[in-house]
Amino acid sequence: MRRPYSTKWMLASGLAIVAAGAFLAWMFVGGGKTGDGAKAVLDVVSNAADLEVKNFRYSQVGDPDFQWEVTADRARYMKKNEEVHLEHVAVRLVSKAGRVYHMIGDRGVLDNGTGDMEITGNVVVDSDRGERLETEILRYRAAEKKVRTDGNVKMYRENMRLSGKGMTFTLEKNEMVLSSNVKAVISNVSLFY
């Protein structure tokens, strides 16, 4: 039969744990330094990410109209701004109608509070119907279910190339509007038989 721990042993163990915790807290706050040394340590800690994850994956399935999954090589959660900063980001979006969109970009920011997302740097969107869109920045607004950019856009489809400046894509209507400087090239057109 195992002997219960003595009161003396339990008290010594508890004091050792409290002392170790106090020492770690003291080291974290600046090693007992006062003045600028402690402030510098605290500044570094407060500007750093609250959480950093490699091979990040996040799925959102609560919306009846759209399901999406975000993956990234690295994600940094910034609690102060309620943002997740992403590196080498990919998004897969599936609409209620079954349309599938794949988006990739160098960087991204996901707003935890609103569900809004911004993808920047070499942004490419491919659809399940063979459409491709290229731009440098895309902004998704969850409340509006719209994807927008103010930058240059190129879109490719089987027999069509479009380009323009500024674009709004409404997911619910599956409707895209190019804002200005629109150019189109359509091949294999048969207007006259």
Image: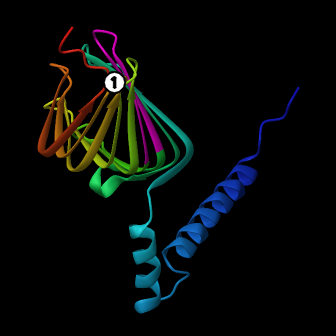
Q: How many numbered badges does the structure rendering display?
A: 1
Residue 172: quarter of image? top left
The foreground one among 172 and 22 is 172
Q: Is residue 119 left or right of residue 183?
A: right
Q: Position of residue 107 (x, y in %)?
A: 42, 52
Q: Position of residue 156 (x, y in %)?
A: 34, 32
* Residue bounds of the magenta highlight: 89-105
Q: Relative to 133, say whether 61 is above or below.
A: above
- Say which residue appears at 18% left-offset and 12% top-offset: 192
Magenta stretch holds residue 144: no
Which residue in the protein does label 1 denote? 159
Q: Residue furthest bottom?
A: 35
The foreground one among 3 and 50 is 50
Q: Is residue 101 left or right of residue 166?
A: right
Q: Position of residue 116 (x, y in %)?
A: 24, 40
Q: Relative to 78, say whether 173 is above or below.
A: above
The foreground one among 99 and 112 is 99
